[in-house]
Image (cartoon, rainbow, N blue to C red):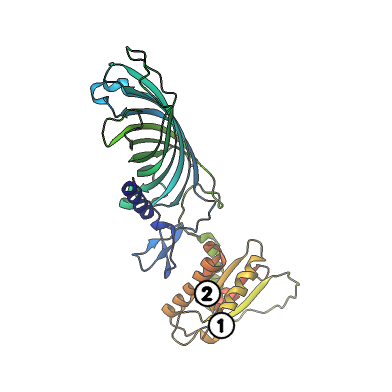
Amino acid sequence: MKRFTQIFVMLFLVSSVGYAQDTAPQTEVKATTETVYWVDSTANNAKLLNKSKFTDNWFLGLHLGTYHTWGSNSNSAKFWTMVQPAVAISFGKMLAPAGGFRLQAAFAQHKGQLADPWESYYYNSVGGHLDGLLSISNLILGYKESRRFNLLGVVGVGVENTFGISDYDWNDGKKYFNNDGTVSMIVRAGLMAQYRISKAWDISLEVLNTFIDDEFDSQVTNKTFDGHVNIMLGMNYRFKNHDGSRQFTYARRNMTKYEVLNKALDSLRAENAKPVEPEVIIKKEAVKSNQIRTVISFEKGVSKINRLQEVNVYTAAQALSQIKDGDLYITINEKAKDMDKDLFMARAQSIRNMLVNNFNIAAGKIFIEKNPALIDSLAPEKDCVILYINE
């Protein structure tokens, strides 16, 4: 059993590799004309997933089906006579698109076969299992939010207890069975197909082969294992995540918020196109505003944030948390307007990474614009945080 347990642990660790999301240099790329995703520029511009919390991606499943028990003398019995009903309930979590785990409790009826006298007998089992789930579809084809069909590998360990063994007497009146059941360690493996029928529900069909000690059917015939093949049809409910979704989602940018900057850009272009300076009318009006501005400095030619400057990023994050529905804009200081565009983007991405990864600022609230004039032209009543990059 140790060998089977070691194999399971190795496979289960593989399924959890995607759970840790390392920070990587990131840029933005348009997926469609309406949607923009954050991507990892070091991994062929692969789209980045939104960060998940511990409470995300949990599911509950109910399964009905059959167990085909194999073991002592089962080869001499008819196939269908060894098929008996089973029911199970499972609760688990997907750690990453690559896989997750589940805990399952199961109850089943079994049928055994005696060699002499040639009779059948019945017994029940109740078991608890820990299964590792490995998404074959996502590993081979890559994760897609819209994918409905998913094929998973299942590898598990657990305990099963048999009880309620029916009594049979020999011709001399002695009972064949001298025990009330056994408690056995089990190892199982198989495949599960899932099909999503709605955001919250999916149906599943799984086929698993379970390996158990030779005493499982209360007969010892010097075989290595007894066991059963499980064929279960399931209905699974996915609980809602902290962001309202029920699955892993990619980090998106809401491009409609750029309309403010686009309008400001059009306004600047229109003013520069006028041949004659328009008459300036100064109108004083008290406007309530909550625009917070801060500056972060970098060493010359470097995009990594100096430790002494991290406090400025923290200040910007704290300020944004105090603004309801506010946004954060990253631009350059007027003195640094000749900064190379690539260097500016690298520095802006460093700031964005720290805001998202260290201070849990939503990626959709962060906007990067190299032209400070566009940021300065924001409506004075717009509540926001503006972070200037200086050198």
- Image quadrant where residue 73 sits: top left
Residue 18, position as x, y percentages in the image: 40, 57
Which residue is located at x 36 percent, y 39 percent?
192
User: Tag 2: Cα neighbours inside 10 Å, few (<14), some, or many (≥20)?
Assistant: few
In front of the other: label 2 or label 1?
A: 1
Which residue is located at x 36 percent, y 16 percent?
174
- Is 344 or 247 nearer to us in this picture? 247
Residue 145, position as x, y percentages in the image: 42, 49
Q: As drawn, which residue projects farthest toward the left? A: 76
- Relative height, residue 358 to residue 103 (above, below): below
The disc, 2 or 1, on the residue closer to the chain's N-terminal end is 2
Mark 2 and 1 residues: CB-CB less than 8 Å, in contact? no
Residue under label 1, please give it: 308
Residue type at mark 2 is Arg
Residue under label 2, please give it: 269
In the picture provided, is 62 more to the left or to the right than 230?
right
